[in-house]
Image (tube, rainbow, N blue to C red):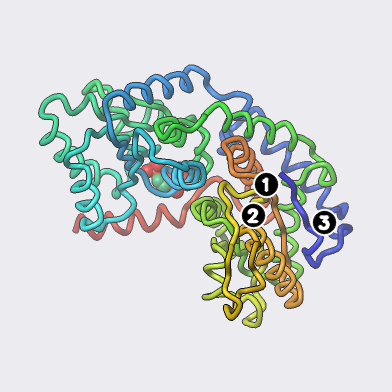
């Protein structure tokens, strides 16, 4: 993976400034401290992950593949966005086990539609909640349990897996009391940093993805990004870049754009990662994912000539999974000039054309390039952005590992429903 900040509108000296060097060194030590109680278990996870838990995921996935057509994953926020990002990015063909996500809203019409689709299929349910208190999850569990009981009678609990805290919470207690199978969310690892744990791995392996390759990519990122100096660490260069475009250039919005729709859910994961980690104390860049060229026809105009608040971060996939050439275009067709060109050439020209246009509009641009979409690169990107986000949050002076605003909405909602 390569990071290119040549179009950032900033000077390299700004990014490598002495003041930042000192801050980053301190942040590096905080992130990699042996004491992970601040919420930093993810930082050394590619090296220290629990291999027994990893094997348990493989074992459960094997069982699910042998007896289920679908895995219904019930989780919200960090407890599903990473899994969805990986599935949407990496799964290219119909899989033995279809992954369906639920628990992501209170709209019963949505859930009913999913359950109706599943009614004639064999299903395993994976309830994912670190806290075991999230109302979307517990209310969906209630309905899904009714569905499973109706379908499998007294045997239904053998088709339920709870992914939750090692000790605490309702789900863990219920699992112990009723002998329900469990997986564990590691200690001091918040939802949005948990995709490499069982939270993401069970859906990934069930969908036929290579979990070892994902971890190999994450491990190589962990090794490649272990330097505490900005010059040697692209994740820290990117964190400082983000800080500068906000503080020095006054940008308020970071658009995560890709010309590959396979990256759209990865963008949604990035949105949550940065928004929930940084959006505190009146600070942070508002992050929003876009897919081009689709969204150039909706928000391209604003990026080009609207209020100058946006910066753009591209995730550029160099080689698409599939390609074809245009051929036999009629002489009078307005796209005759594309005759013989491949779709990837055209997409690439669209990317470079957009880059030029947005550079002309003085939009700060960061470009991440990956050679292709695969498990290894997914793992690499996940670790890269987790590290960059942790560093970026600390540079802002906020705690990147809590989410007090979200907790507040949950508690107001509970009060309203209790009264
Ligand atoms: O990233 C986070 O920590 C949050 O988005 C949580 O994942 C989300 O609120 C769901 O919480 P829980 O896993 O406790 O149900």
Q: Residues within 10 Å of mark 1 (few under 14, many from 20)?
A: some
Question: Which label's residue is closer to the chain start, 3 or 1?
Answer: 3
Q: Disc 1 marks which residue?
A: 370
Towards the viewer: 224 or 355: 355
Towards the viewer: 187 or 384: 384
Per the model, the C-alpha gap separating discs 3 and 1 is 23 Å
The answer to whether the residues at label 2 and label 1 have Cβ atoms under 8 Å apart is yes
Q: Position of residue 47 (x, y in %)?
A: 63, 25
Horizontally, is 125 left or right of 361 in the view?
left
Q: Residues within 10 Å of mark 3 (few under 14, many from 20)?
A: many
The answer to whether the residues at label 3 and label 2 have Cβ atoms under 8 Å apart is no
Q: Position of residue 327 (x, y in %)?
A: 59, 63
Q: Quadrant of ligand 1?
A: top left
CB of mark 3 near ligand 1 (< 8 Å)? no
Query: Would residue 161 be seen by someone viewing this image from the given angle?
Result: yes
Query: In the picture, residue 138 is in which quadrant?
Result: top left
Circle number at residue 315: 2
Per the model, the C-alpha gap separating discs 3 and 2 is 21 Å
Q: Disc 3 marks which residue?
A: 15
Question: Which label's residue is closer to the chain start, 2 or 1?
Answer: 2
Per the model, the C-alpha gap separating discs 2 and 1 is 8 Å
Query: In the picture, residue 183 is in which quadrant?
Result: top left
Mark 3, mark 2: which one is toward the viewer?
Answer: 2
Query: In the picture, residue 145 is in which quadrant?
Result: top left
Question: Which label's residue is closer to the chain start, 3 or 2?
Answer: 3
């Amino acid at each position: 993976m390569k990071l290119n900040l040549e179009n950032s509108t900033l000077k390299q000296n700004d990014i490598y400034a002495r003041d930042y060097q000192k801050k980053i060194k301190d942040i590096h030590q905080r992130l990699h401290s042996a004491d992970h109680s601040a919420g930093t278990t993810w930082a050394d996870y590619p090296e220290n992950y629990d291999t027994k838990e990893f094997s348990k995921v493989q074992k459960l996935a094997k069982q699910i593949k042998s007896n289920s057509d679908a895995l219904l994953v019930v989780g919200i926020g960090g407890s599903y966005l990473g899994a969805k990002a990986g599935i949407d990015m990496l799964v290219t063909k119909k899989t033995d086990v279809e992954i369906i996500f639920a628990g992501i809203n209170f709209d019963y019409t949505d859930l009913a539609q999913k359950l109706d689709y599943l009614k004639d299929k064999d299903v395993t349910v994976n309830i994912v909640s670190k806290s075991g208190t999230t109302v979307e999850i517990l209310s969906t569990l209630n309905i899904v349990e009714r569905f499973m009981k109706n379908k499998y009678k007294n045997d239904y609990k053998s088709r339920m897996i709870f992914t939750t805290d090692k000790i605490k919470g309702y789900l863990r207690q219920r699992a112990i009391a009723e002998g329900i199978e469990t997986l564990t969310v590691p200690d001091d690892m918040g939802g949005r940093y948990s995709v490499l744990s069982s939270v993401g791995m069970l859906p990934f392996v069930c969908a036929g993805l290579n979990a070892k390759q994902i971890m190999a990519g994450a491990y190589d990122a962990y090794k490649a990004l272990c330097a505490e100096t900005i010059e040697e660490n692209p994740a820290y260069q990117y964190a400082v870049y983000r800080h500068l475009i906000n503080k020095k250039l006054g940008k308020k919005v970071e658009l995560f754009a890709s010309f590959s729709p396979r990256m759209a859910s990865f963008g949604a994961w990035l949105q949550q990662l940065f928004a929930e980690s940084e959006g505190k104390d009146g600070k942070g860049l508002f992050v929003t994912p876009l897919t081009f060229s689709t969204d150039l026809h909706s928000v391209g105009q604003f990026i080009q000539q609207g209020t100058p608040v946006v910066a753009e971060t591209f995730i550029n996939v160099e080689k698409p999974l599939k390609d074809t050439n245009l051929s036999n275009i009629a002489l009078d067709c307005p796209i005759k000039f594309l005759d013989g060109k491949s779709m990837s050439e055209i997409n690439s020209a669209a990317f470079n054309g957009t880059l030029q246009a947005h550079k002309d509009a003085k939009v700060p641009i960061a470009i991440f390039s990956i050679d292709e979409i695969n498990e290894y690169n997914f793992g690499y990107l996940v670790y890269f952005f987790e590290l960059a986000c942790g560093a970026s949050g600390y540079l802002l002076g906020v705690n990147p590992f809590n989410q007090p605003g979200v907790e507040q909405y949950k508690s107001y909602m509970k009060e309203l429903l209790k009264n």
